[in-house]
Amino acid sequence: MFFPPGLEKVFLVIYFISIPYITGLIFLYFYVAGGKTETFLALSESSSFILTWAIGYEIIAVISILWIIKSAISFSMSVSSKNRKFQRPV
């Protein structure tokens, strides 16, 4: 769906570069600059592409890890709520 046939590798590289960079820009704009355009523009002149990308990459990594932990907890709760007893295969 997100990868056109025949261009999978190209779009994978594009997504790998652009999604963390956009996430880093959003973080810098709302959290660091406080939503002020003038502050953000002054900040973006001094920050490099790789720094912004790394910030976004770390944010995406933390969100992914938290989502995996939430999924594991909800799976564990759903299995224990069924009151199934574990039986060792014979």
Image: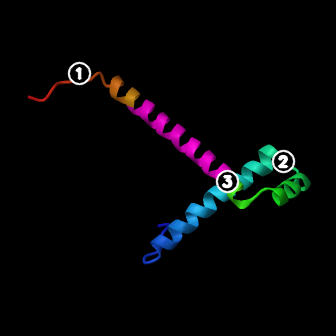
SS at mark 1 in the image: loop
Mark 1 residue crowding within 10 angstroms, few (<14) / some (14–19) / many (20+) = few
Residue ID for mark 2 = 33
Q: What residue type is labelled 1?
A: Lys
Which residue occupies the foreground of this view, 32 or 30?
A: 32
Q: Which amino acid does label 2 sit on?
A: Ala
The image position of residue 21, as x and y in percent, is 67, 58
Magenta region: which residues?
54-75
SS at mark 3 in the image: helix
- Position of residue 27 relative to residue 8, above or below, is above
The answer to whether residue 30 is left or right of residue 11 is: right
- Position of residue 61 relative to residue 78, above or below, is below
Q: Residue 85 carries which label?
A: 1
Which residue occupies the foreground of this view, 46 or 9?
A: 46
Q: Which residue is depicted at the point 79% across and 47% down?
A: 30
Q: What is the quadrant of residue 19 in the picture?
A: bottom right
Residue ID for mark 3 = 23
